[in-house]
Image (tube, grey):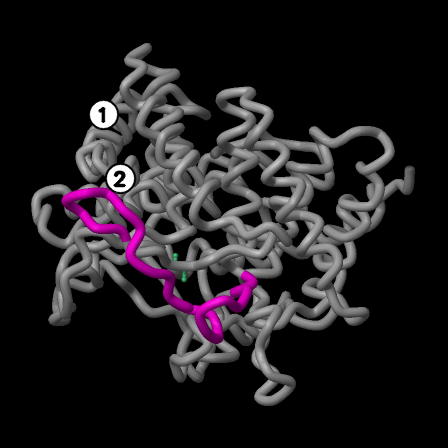
Amino acid sequence: MEDYTAWTDEVIGKIRLKMAWSSEKNKNKIPYTTNEYGEYDDKADTSREWRIDDGINWWTNGFWAGIQWLLYQDTGEERYKEIARISERMLEQCFSGFYGLHHDVGFMFVPAAVADYRLTGNDDSRKAGMHAANLLAGRFNPAGRFIRAWNDLEQDTRGWVIIDCMMNLSLLYWAWEESGDPRFKHIAMMHADTVMKYFVRPDGSVNHLVEFDPVTGEQVRCYGGQGYEEGSAWARGQGWALYGFMISYLHTGKNDYLDTARKIAQYCVSNIPESGILPLDFRQPKEPAYEDSCGACVIAGGLLEFARCASANEREIYLRAAVKILRAIADERADFDDSCDAIVKGCSAAYHSPAHDMTMNYADYFFIEAVYKLKGTGKLLW
Ligand code: GLY
């Protein structure tokens, strides 16, 4: 098996240098993306008017703290813990608003409060994590055995489920392991089973959005969501599915989840271009050639988790694929200098949105996490 130590050490050195100043500079913000001057925005800015699901309720708000916890695990430096906690305290304000919260309390609280509790045993963080887990469990629809994604803003979304929620299940598994209350695990597993049945196609590609009848629980239809169209294969959705089924497998040991992750991993690996730069959607037209570095980093993280659990024969294939993606990001899409607060460039929000070629705090999170995974250091925070 190839030794990646020299490469990971080199990249980790660059990450440390970059995050030392960027974390300090942005310590009182909850950033999402950078502007044309390379400066981070601030989702915790209370002087602005936000849509109800934006601002402090924005779904990526846990990743800034998450980056700090990754660096804290790596360096042991107290300042990363302090910056993560500034972020956590700001983020907890979302609980009092309530109406703006959605299924992504998993994405918001796992890399922040739950990571804090896992690494330091901080009881305030445990409380925040349990509170978020109860909100997530409260979104479960027993008729359809699914977790509702969003609230009604422009339309009736009572029966809408998205593949991304596979990552949110991590919060429920943690709450189950922490409290001993199996309701959290039952809900997570019923949702994962529904996703296995209605989202994962025989070739290992996945639907982004499936609508169910919220009263009877029957499937209504599928949508293309953030991908190109219905039936296409949104790369970041493939990543959420792959990494998400690995999380379900790691917490429950249910082999169906590992087999499902394998199918999705095979689809991803057979569609990685020679360049290692991933398209936004594996089934998008040749032009415009939108790409998504963020989806690439999520897929790399999922492949590394899968490789750890795969048979000796398969391990090398998935490890190499993950490394190919990460090298392409590090060599072609990463900014390690001081002209931009973020590292990973070339991210896209959605195929049909104008937001392409941007930075995203969670692309940085999953890139940094994947490099540490490859190095073999740090606890799994999911
Ligand atoms: N969870 C939404 C996204 O991946 O853009």
Residue under the image location 60 percent in, 50 percent down: 202
Name the residue carrying label 1.
127
From the viewer's perspective, is residue 322 above or below residue 252?
Answer: below
Q: Position of residue 19 (x, y in %)?
A: 54, 54
Does the rendering let one see residue 238? yes
Q: Position of residue 137 (x, y in %)?
A: 23, 32
Question: Residue pushed farthest top?
Answer: 180
Q: Is residue 217 within the magenta segment?
A: yes
In the picture, the quarter occupied by the N terminus is: top right
- Left/right placement of residue 298 relative to residue 55 reads right
**Hey, which quadrant is residue 100 in on the image?**
bottom left
Q: Foreground residue, 337 or 219?
A: 219
Q: Quadrant for residue 346, please give it.
A: bottom right
Can residue 345 be seen from the camera position used here? Answer: no
Q: How many marks?
A: 2
Residue in view at x 55 percent, y 26 percent: 250
Q: Which numbered circle lies on residue 381?
A: none
Q: CA distance from mark 2 to mark 1?
A: 29 Å
Mark 1 surroundings within 10 Å by alpha-carbon count, few (fewer than 14), some (14 through 19), many (20 or more): some
Which amino acid, by three-letter code, is at mark 2? Gly
What amino acid is found at the position of numbered circle 1 in the picture? Lys
Q: Quadrant of ligand 1?
A: bottom left
Q: Position of residue 353 (x, y in %)?
A: 38, 80
Badge 1 element: helix
Q: Label 2, secondary structure: give it.
A: loop
Residue 144 tag number: 2
Q: Nearer the viewer, mark 2 or mark 1?
A: 2
